[in-house]
Amino acid sequence: MNYSMEYVINCYYDHTGYERQQDENYIRKLQQYIERNQLTSRDAESLDSWVKKQRILTIRIYKDGIQVFDSEYPQQELWEEEIAAGDYEWENYYSVKFVDGEAQVYIWGLYAYQFYNYALIIEIMFSFILFLILVLLGIRRKMNYILKLSEEIELLEGGSLDYKITVKGKDELTALAEGLDNMRLSFRSLIKREADIVRENQKVITEMSHDIRTPVTSIMLYTEIIKTGKYKDEVHLKEYIEKIDKKAHRMKQLTEHLYEYTLVTGTTEMVLEEPEYYEVLFYDLFSETCSYLRQKGFTIEFSMEWVDKKLRICTDYIWRIIDNISSNIIKYADPQKAVEICSVCNGNKIGFSFRNAVKQLEETVEGTHVGIPSVKNMMEKMNGICEVRQDKEYFYIAIIFPEAASYSEEDHKRNVTKEYMESE
């Protein structure tokens, strides 16, 4: 705007003769002032007083080709031989009559300054108005964005978690929108995981209910036979009572499994024990497990490498995991082939594995289908991993823990905070 206004002013100033008109107007005023006060070309003080009243003028007076007055140096005495008149094309000289004769006057004025001042005022006003317009447009755009975010939040409140939050720009609102969208994704993932857990629990409970219904039906049937006396002799009576006892034990085992699964998948807080060496944690446990399996007629190939590293576990969970694995081995493993128990060490991950041959079953063995899910849930709560591989011939399960040093500091802080809050 400044360049444009200057261009317009210069064009008007240079092409309309405005400067010459102003020069002639001020020359007439000077002539009238000289005549009124009967001034000579050497009356510097009076001439300087008139120039100062005009404020925008500079004049030089030449008499007989020699400069005798300069308004820029009014107090300086000029000798006739010092400064001669200039002869420049851009300088316009006007004849003025003084008391001591005619003289040539060069006049130069800042006639355009008021135009530049007016232009500056217009530029400032226009810039301020433009600034307000831009700010208001920006605020309106941000308000529209805020309203859009508000509408999208209402959609989220209504349960539409698949609706993506609009993220645009690079300011604080953008960061807020990104945070809302990340919260939406986290919440959706949490709901999905909870739904999966509920679905898995329902599946397990349904299967367990079916498994429990079978021995209950058998017990009711044999009880009805005994009550009505529909048995041939005492041998059959004893056989029915043994079957009832067997089915009752089966029911007890199923209810214990269901209780265990409910306990592991519940919301009960589990606290890991202090870090302890790998050998200290598992040596006695494996000794008892191997003795128990040998009593059941299995051959054990035990090849453990007792690494010098520490783990953090929950002993109660570990006993349940070993009981589950031992029960599955007794139920499904082929006693004619050895059960392999080995250590697992991979970087900062340490654990153990069981590998056994699968026996060919002549009749279907009733299962609860909760053993492996329970083991996986318990390992997840202990920050560990349960790996399972199975085919027609072999079954493999690995129980792996992270080394205590790899996460102990963070866990330690969390446990200390929890203990402190409980003590408070």
Image (cartoon, grey):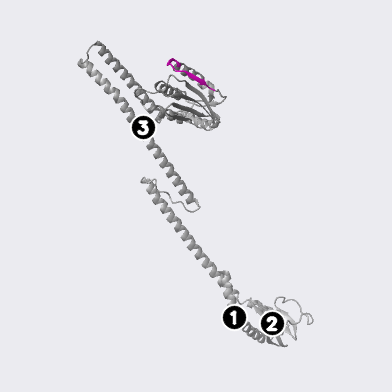
Q: Which mark is residue 24?
A: none
Residue 94: x and y in percent read 67, 85
Q: Is residue 260 left or right of residue 67?
A: left
Q: Is residue 86 above or below residue 369?
A: below
Q: Is residue 250 magenta?
A: no
Q: Is residue 134 left or right of residue 10?
A: left
Residue 261: x and y in percent read 38, 27
Residue at which label 1 appears: 15
Q: Amino acid at mark 2?
A: Glu
Residue drawn at x 46%, y 27% as measured from the top left: 397
Q: Is tag 2's residue or tag 1's residue first in the polypeptide sequence? A: 1
Q: CA distance from mark 1 to mark 3?
A: 95 Å
Q: CA distance from mark 3 to mark 2?
A: 105 Å
Contact, mark 1 vs mark 3 (Cβ under 8 Å): no
Residue drawn at x 48%, y 63% as measured from the top left: 133
Residue at which label 3 appears: 201
The kind of secondary structure element at disc 2 is: loop
Residue at which label 2 appears: 89
